[in-house]
Each structure stands twice: as structure tokens, then as C-alpha cells.
Amino acid sequence: MGRWKAVIPIVLALLVALTASFILYRWTKKRVTPDVAVTEDLKIRKVAVAKVAIPAGTRLNRDVIAFASFLQETLPPGAFSDPKKVAGRVVLTPLRPKELILNSKLAPVSVKVGGVAVLIKPGKRAVTVKGGKVLGVAGFIRPGNRVDIMLRTKGSGKNKIVFENVRVLATGSRLGRSEKGKPQPVDTFTLEVTPEEGERLALASTQGTLQFALRNITDNATVLTTGANMQETLAQYRPIVPTDRTAKPEVTRRVGVGRAPVRAAPAPRKGLRLEVIKGLNRTVKQY
């Protein structure tokens, strides 16, 4: 009988503990899990993406197209699920690897041939000029950049900006000939200009030396310049010599009442002050 007196409290304590644990578990579950389970039907769609980097003007084929899974609701309009609808289209803007291929980034379906001709805006023309690494700003000019074009005319030594904010459609190299007849690489730059600008650009390329000035991609300001020549360039750092070397006239003034007028000394003339330092010796000369 004494044994049961010791066991009964232990059993009662276990029952109370189990009951409390069960009640706490049910309460916690109701707090975490909502009363009504919300289920959402997520639709997955496979769409075309760029498999590799695709430059503008490229005609798409299945070798450069891949397919990736996206949520239906996150897709922008113009995505392609059918490979037949995207193959053969021409890219208008460069595509990066795994970037979505959208209809807005492609030329119309009627355009079947790629190349620079697709990138030219209506009313514009593509004109190619040749030059070297200096003309191309040491190779930093890329398709899509905008440049100003300076012309240095033969014989006059005059340098002037003749075209501003010109779009570069393409850059490339072709094999030219030096004066001795040996092959040498010559860079070529294809620019987008109006027909009138194309006439002037073709003429300018034969009358002197062209030089490109690379613009910031967001800079669309027009800057009008008068040009520069060697004499004006060297004169920028010459000392300023006063042109008026005449002395100021004397000035009279009265000092006190009833006193004779006193003539003030003339103001000193302006000149040049030259400081010469030789070792530890320092001399100043006034001109």
C-alpha cells in the first residue's frame, strides 16, 4: 500500500504534464497556421532567352537561343514560347546572356537580313571613314557610342569641330596599303549621319585629318566653337602686357581752408615685374 502512495503522485504529474503539452501544442498550431489554407496556382512558362551575348544586327538561329522557366505573371509582354516564332528574327539592341528575347528588341518580321542596315534610323545614312588608333581614341570607341569629329585642314593648321553627337554604328578593320605598298591595318568607323552630313563628311575626309572626341553617353549638348590654330593656342599662356603705357594726369586738391592747392604726384605706370632666382641669389627687375 505504501508503494502505491508513492506511484500515484508521479502518475498524476505525468498526466497533468501531457495534458498541458497537448493544449499548448494545439494553441500554438492555431496561432501559426491560418484557419483557412490559401492555395495559389502558380503557372510556369518556358520562354526564349539569349544563350550567349548577341550583338545588334544579328539574325537569330537556334544555336544562340535557349529556354528558361519563368512565372507567368512576372513575364513582360512580347516574350516567346515557340522557337519557330523567334528563329530568323533580327536583333535591334544587344542582348546579354540569359536576357529575355522580347518582340520590342527585334526588327519586324518582314526584315530577314541582318547587319548594319537594320540599325540605321529612317532618314539617316551610314558612312564609313578610315583612320588609325589615334582617330579611334586608342580603341575605346565601340558601336553605339557618340562622338564629335574634328577636322585639321591641310596647310592651314586650323583645327575645328565640324560634326557633333554622331552615332557610331560599327567599328572594324580592313587591310590597307602603306606608301611602300606593304599591308598595314587600317581601322574603319561606320557613322550614322543625314544625307547632307554624309556629303560634308566625305569631303572633309579628303581635305584633311579627322580626329574623334568621345562623348559621355548621356551628353546631348551642342557646343559651338570657333576652332583653334597654332598661334592662338600658343598665345593662351603668354603673360598679359598692359597696352596703356601713358601716365595718368596730375590731380589737384586743397588741404585745409585758405591754403594753396597741393599737386599730387602722378600715379606710377603699370609694368612687368620679373623675379630671377639663380641658386641663392634673387633679383627683381621692373619693366
Image (tube, helix red, strand yellow):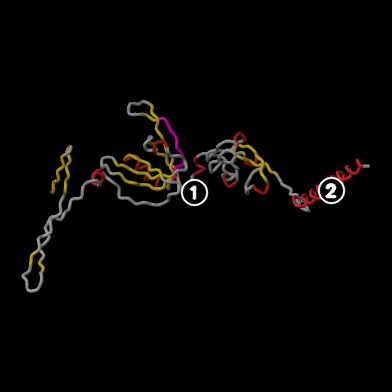
Observer-nearest residue: 75 or 246?
Answer: 246
Mark 2 lies on a secondary structure that is helix
Q: Position of residue 282 (x, y in %)?
A: 16, 42
Please, which residue is most extreme toward the bottom here? 258
Q: Where is residue 243 in the image (x, y as percent from the top left)?
A: 16, 54
Residue 122: image tag:
1
Circles 2 and 1, Cβ within 8 Å, touching? The answer is no
Give yes or no for residue 138 being in the magenta stretch. no
* Label 1 crowd (10 A; few <14 / some 14-19 / many >=20): few
Instruction: Say whether disc 2 or disc 1 marks the residue closer to the N-terminus.
Output: 2
Give yes or no for residue 170 being in the magenta stretch. yes
Residue at figure coordinates x 74%, y 48% from the top left: 41
The amino acid at mark 2 is: Val
The amino acid at mark 1 is: Pro
Say left or right for 116 vs 48.
left
Q: In which quarter of the image is the N terminus?
A: top right
Q: Which image quarter: residue 178?
A: top left
Q: Where is residue 89 in the image (x, y as percent from the top left)?
A: 59, 41
Q: Distance between the residues labelled 2 and 1?
A: 86 Å
- Disc 2 versus disc 1: nearer the observer: 2
Q: Where is residue 66 in the image (x, y as percent from the top left)?
A: 63, 37
Residue 209: image tag:
none
Q: Name the residue under label 2.
A: 16
Please, which residue is most extreme toward the front here? 2
The magenta segment: 167-175
Q: State whether the magenta stretch is mostly helix, strand or loop.
A: strand
Say left or right for 225 vs 121.
left
Mark 1 lies on a secondary structure that is loop
Q: Which image quarter: residue 262?
A: bottom left
- Up/down of 268 relative to 170, above or below: below
